[in-house]
Amino acid sequence: MIEGSIVDEKRYVIGVIGDIPALLALWEMFKDQSNDETLREIGVVAVALPGESVLPEATDAGRIVPTYAGYKAMLEKHPEINMIIEATGRPSLVFELRKYLPPAITLVERGAAQFFINLLASNQMWVACKVDLLHTQTMLKTIVDQMDQEILFLNRDGMVVGMNQTVLDRSGLPKRALMGKHYCDVFTRSKEGECEEWEDPFERTMMTHAPAEATTSLVDPDGRVQYFRVYTSPVADEDGAVNHVVAMRRDITQRRAMENRLQQAERLASIGELSTYMAHEIRNPLFSISGFANSLMRDKDVGTKAREKLSIILDESRRLDEVLRSLLNFTRPTEAQVAEVDLNEVVRATMDVMQLPCSNQNVVPHVSLDEGMARVHANPDLIKQCLINLIKNALEAMKSGGKLYVTTAMNQDMAVLAVEDTGVGIPLDIRDKIFSPFFSTKDKGVGLGLAQIHKIVGELGGRVDLVSMEGVGTKVTLFLPPTLAVEDSGDSA
């Protein structure tokens, strides 16, 4: 007989009636399809084998289960049984059991037993599918949250219905503040519900049911431009209808900076070839033109009107020669003599020269010099030229007056020279072009000032940083490598 403690733990104490093949098949099926929770509630305490002359012993979870030649003997020995499973399926035996068994014992016929076994199998499959789905969902969320790109999940109207952790981290907003917003409010910081004037990839995806992409730019609170690439991909249902869209934003500012440097290098190479050609093919005829014009100006027989025209020819010849000289100087490597330069001294000398232009334009200069500045290895005249160009550009941006800030400082391992104005600022659409050769917003000049600054600082091993906001002002910072505390080897650069 089964131990009392085991019976107490089971909800269903079972006796099984059947021939050996049917019994074994039914029990193995039951154990295979059941889960651990079900088996903990069920215990088989005895088996009846009607008509069997040899009574083999059965086992259940390592226990020996007693067998009997008939169900009446089984019930007499095991009054704790509260369920009988009839495994033979013989109608006569089923009829007999219905009449004999008391109400306290539940009779489960073979067909019902098989039904519940299949039900258990379905439940087990559902549980397994649920566990697998939860595992897949957790894994997918972990992958999406760890991606460096910002990802939004949108409905058909472009409203945010979900996002990855990167969006929350970079926006600094809680999830509830972003849910239900239009995706442009998150990715382009435009007015609520309106996208900026760009080729909206979401609209194209909804129209074409295909992936789309576009570039957008933002000015951060410090006035620096960030470039982003926005990608949208459709999510279709079983009928092929797009019901959701995935939008991803990737920061491409570094890539854009590299592209700009590469384009500028290509332009400089082209300008170098062009300048050589111009020097040979234009300067010689230009010299002849100006020479003959000077000769005619000295001729007493030339009339007043002709002299006026000759004067125009000479002025334009000189202007063209100046353009050629600037171009040739720009394309040639800087060969000026370098020395240890005191940036503070350069600023003082330059501001002495530029004090009058500032006063004439009602611009108030503010000079802040770091007395602990390191010296830089450069040519003082070229650094002064860069500073004068920056101040002139600042004055051009403050035609109605304003404030000019010139500062020096040490920034970690670099010496810093900065010029900041309170002028009109630089429009976003030309921000990428201002350091390009021959680009100028002025009526006069050849557009080499900022390009020359970029070239000079770059050859010294430094860099130029620009921050600008329209209506607020512009700040250009030169980062120059300081002179190192090492003995001079005596080699000339």
Image (cartoon, rainbow, N blue to C red):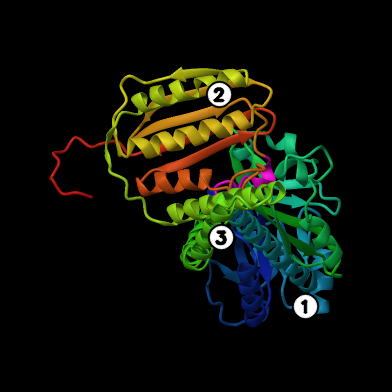
The residue at the point 81 percent across, 61 percent down is: 204
Q: Position of residue 66 (x, y in %)?
A: 55, 67
Q: Position of residue 263 (x, y in %)?
A: 54, 60
Mark 2 and mark 3 lie on one chain; the one further toward the N terminus is 3
Secondary structure state at the residue bearing disc 1: loop
Q: Which mark is residue 426?
A: none
Which SS type dominates the magenta stretch?
loop
Under mark 2, the amino acid is Pro
In-front residue for pair 171/465: 465
Instruction: Say which quarter of the image contains residue 85.
Output: bottom right
Mark 1 and mark 2 lie on one chain; the one further toward the N terminus is 1
Q: Say whether residue 149 is visible.
A: no
Residue ID for mark 3: 289
Q: Say whether residue 327 is visible.
A: yes
Instruction: Say which quarter of the image contains residue 116.
Output: bottom right
Residue ID for mark 2: 357
Residue ID for mark 1: 89
The residue at the point 65 percent across, 21 percent down is: 401
Q: Position of residue 411 (x, y in %)?
A: 38, 31
Under mark 1, the amino acid is Gly
Q: Position of residue 13 (x, y in %)?
A: 65, 56
